[in-house]
Amino acid sequence: MNYMMGFIMRCWKKIKLWWLALIISTGALAAGEGIQIKSAELRLQDDVYYLQAQMMVIPNPTLEDALRKGVSLYFVTDFELKRPRWYWLNEDVAHYTRVSRLSYNALLRQYVVSGVNIHARSVDKLDEALLALGEVSAVPIVTRNELDTRETYQAKLTMRLDTTQLPKPLQINALASGKWDLEATPMLWTFKP
């Protein structure tokens, strides 16, 4: 009886260590994937507030594989500026949405970043394409005259992979799998003109 108990305890320790190693390695992989908003601000220039932001996009292996096989990935960047009101819903002051497309040209072996308000860029490395994808530079948001200097405004910036732009078979796969979920935690800050 003691022999059996000792055997089970040794096996149980090995199983616990194996599960612990698996959980730690999975967490380490997941930590390196996703979208992180590194910085965002509104800058005043010539009586217009411009949005400057830098996001870091790190796709998981499933997304990288789909990209290399010719699937274009569409990313949506949303910015909102609101004036809080105690007596009613917050007032929408400004809203900006940008749709960016990341694709791979297998013939030229280049990654292409394109979209509205983005100069199309072709680069050789995925890292360079992801850097260009995450950059929001000098986007006019609101004029100085539209803002009240006595008020404090709430700004919100987010970025996500738009799975509705994927081919239909992959949209079904995206619904069933978390591997296609790529979304930044929204960056919230207060802004006083």
Image (tube, rainbow, N blue to C red):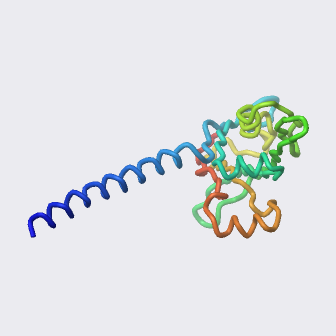
Left or right for 178, reference 116:
left
Across and down, in percent, residue 127 comes to 70, 33
Left or right for 38, reference 71:
left
Quadrant housing the C terminus: top right
Q: Residue at x 57, y 62 (%)?
A: 86
Quadrant housing the N terminus: bottom left
Across and down, in percent, residue 15 comes to 31, 58
Q: Quadrant of residue 8?
A: bottom left
Q: Quadrant of residue 189?
A: top right
Q: In the picture shown, does residue 183 fall above or below 174?
A: above
Q: In the picture shown, does residue 35 fall above or below 179?
A: above
The answer to whether residue 96 is seen in the rendering is yes
Pick whichever, 185 or 146, lies toward us.
185
The answer to whether residue 50 is seen in the rendering is no
- Mark count: 0
Left or right for 93, reference 10:
right
Q: Residue at x 68, y 36 (%)?
A: 54
Residue, far left: 2
Pick whichever, 127 or 115, lies toward us.
127
Across and down, in percent, residue 139 comes to 80, 39
Q: Residue at x 59, y 48 (%)?
A: 188
Across and down, in percent, residue 44 comes to 74, 32
